[in-house]
């Protein structure tokens, strides 16, 4: 299991989906799972956060479905904060899954804030007003720095990846890391890359955080 972290506009949803498709794995985005329920649209459009326990319950179900199908998993921005991480730790101690023991790597996409704002303005999603974007960026900064120490304590390898450049360049940087932690055959062909990028971009408009 690999986790992608990054603020809005970093490309984490695009790259996470691309890596999952490249290897035939399951991509699970918190935003996608929440929106698929249809219960949290108003909260998400305001840039607010859904209750952590509800998110954990929903994501655990999706992880269980993927595992039952024998799928490797790419998680998009989950756990999103220290509260969710602590819930997962508590459940592990209670005899459930050792969530953090299943993580092969955490990948953080690093993009300057000015570039993030430019990308967000270009993608034109309905909930991408600047106030919401600023709030999401603040939340990400707070959350990632609270989660990283916990990941390090659990010996989860953390890789910071330069998110600047073309889609292919960033994907290649991530691919090198993935091959080191989970050597696997590529299932897509070179001519599929553009279609996968376009599909991932559309999903990010609809589902990205």
Image (cartoon, rainbow, N blue to C red):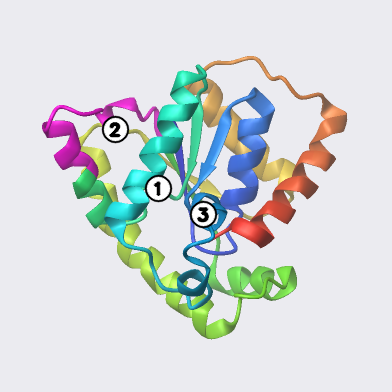
- Residue 91: say if magenta: yes
Q: Earlier in the sequence, mark 2 or mark 1?
A: 1
Q: Residue furthest bottom?
A: 131
The image quadrant of residue 176 is: top right
Q: Residue furthest right?
A: 191
Considering the image in quadrants, where does the N terminus appear? top left
Give left or right: position of 79 versus 67.
Answer: left
* Residue that appears at 25% across and 31% down: 155
Disc 2 target residue: 99
Q: Secondary structure at mark 2?
A: helix
Q: Earlier in the sequence, mark 2 or mark 3?
A: 3
Q: Secondary structure at mark 3?
A: helix
For the residues labelled 3 and 1, say whether their Cβ atoms are less than 8 Å apart: no
Above or below, 83 relative to 69: below
Residue 111, image x, y percentages: 55, 60
Give the numbered dot on residue 78. 1
For the residues labelled 2 and 1, say whether their Cβ atoms are less than 8 Å apart: no
Residue neighbourhood size for the residue with mark 1, other residues' Cα within 10 Å, grouped as few (<14), some (14–19), many (≥20): some
- Could you give the CA–CA distance between mark 2 and mark 1, rounded to whole angstroms? 11 Å
- Residue 147: say if magenta: no
Q: Secondary structure at mark 1?
A: loop
Give left or right: position of 183 versus 167.
Answer: left
Above or below, 41 relative to 177: below
Read off the magenta span: 88-105
Q: Residue furthest left?
A: 94
- Which circle, 3 or 1, is nearer the viewer? 3
Disc 3 target residue: 37
């Amino acid at each position: 299991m690999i986790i992608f972290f990054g603020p809005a506009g970093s490309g984490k949803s695009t790259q996470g989906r691309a890596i999952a498709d490249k290897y035939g794995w399951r991509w699970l985005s918190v935003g996608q799972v929440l929106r698929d329920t249809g219960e949290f649209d108003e909260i998400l459009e305001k840039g607010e956060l859904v209750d952590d326990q509800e998110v954990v319950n929903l994501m655990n179900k999706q992880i269980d479905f993927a595992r039952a199908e024998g799928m490797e998993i790419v998680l998009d921005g989950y756990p999103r904060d220290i509260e969710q991480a602590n819930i997962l730790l508590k459940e592990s101690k209670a005899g459930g899954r050792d969530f953090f023991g299943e993580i092969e790597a955490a990948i953080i996409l690093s993009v300057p804030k000015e570039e993030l704002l430019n990308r967000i303005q270009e993608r034109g999603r309905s909930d991408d007003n600047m106030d919401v974007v600023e709030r999401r960026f603040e939340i990400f900064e707070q959350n990632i720095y609270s989660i990283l120490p916990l990941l390090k304590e659990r010996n989860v390898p953390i890789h910071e990846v330069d998110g600047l450049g073309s889609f292919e360049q960033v994907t290649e940087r991530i691919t090198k890391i993935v091959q080191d932690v989970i050597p696997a055959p590529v299932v897509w062909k070179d001519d599929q890359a553009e279609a996968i990028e376009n599909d991932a971009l559309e999903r990010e408009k609809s589902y990205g955080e």
